[in-house]
Amino acid sequence: MLEVGSGNGELLEILREAGWQTEGIDFDPAAVTIAHHRGLAVKLGTMESQQYASDTFDAVTSSHTIEHLHDPARFLRESHRILKSGGRLAIVTPNAHSLCHRFFKQSWHGLDPPRHLYVFGIPSLRRLATEAGFQNIRIRTTIRDADRLYAISQDIRLTNRHTWGSPRPLSVRIQGTIFEFLEYFLVALGRPTGEEIVVIAEK
């Protein structure tokens, strides 16, 4: 398994313990150093710069990385090329059509300018994955961290900034919990309004 945007290697370590042979790539030298200290095979740079042979991996995974890339379509094509036949791609990214985005609009934390170059909806991701050659594409949304994202977006709306680790007032925590329950029920009813998009696709 290859993880693109592997950070400090936390997920790779879990996957390795589960029996996977793992490899990672990240843009951050400090994160790569930490991963090396954990005994993980992580390279610095982009996936394209590694020049992997075709049909190398059983799985490619990427969580909250594709929105940072200058050419997401190229990333998906390269993922398809290096996967073995029947291999799977798994991607997680912020959902442009989330309930939180609709509520907070330009204050939604998922926009995160200038770090996020693209923010996707389900239709755009499905089209890009199809054009890259993937099949059996399954896409859904999740409510993971909806209460926290509510609080951060509320900070941005009120102060135009958010300080990581700052305490959340009780009133905001209660509002966030209510918001998360609302989002849960909408997603359970089949509405694609969760904070994250999850894509699973096959070569």
Image (cartoon, helix red, strand yellow):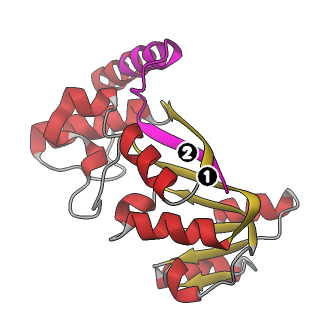
Q: Is residue 3 left or right of residue 130?
A: right
Q: CA distance from mark 1 to mark 2?
A: 6 Å
Q: On the image, which quarter does residue 21 sit in?
A: bottom right
**Residue at the disc numbered 2:** 199
Q: How many marks?
A: 2
Q: Is residue 42 left or right of residue 143?
A: right
Query: What type is the residue that disc 2 sits on?
Result: Val
Badge 2 density bin: few <14, some 14–19, many ≥20, Cα 10 Å: many
Instruction: Tell me residue 104's x, y (percent).
Output: 19, 32
Q: Mark 1 and mark 2 in contact? Answer it, CB < 8 Å.
A: yes
Give me the residue at 23% from left, 40% from top.
Answer: 108
Residue 90 bears which disc, if any? Answer: 1
Give the answer, above or below, for where 162 lies relative to 181.
below
The numbered mark, 1 or 2, whose residue comes first in the sequence reads 1
Give me the residue at 23% from left, 28% from top.
Answer: 102
Q: Is residue 18 left or right of residue 143?
A: right
Query: What type is the residue that disc 1 sits on?
Result: Ala
Image quarter in which the N terminus is found: bottom right
Q: Which residues are magenta?
A: 179-203
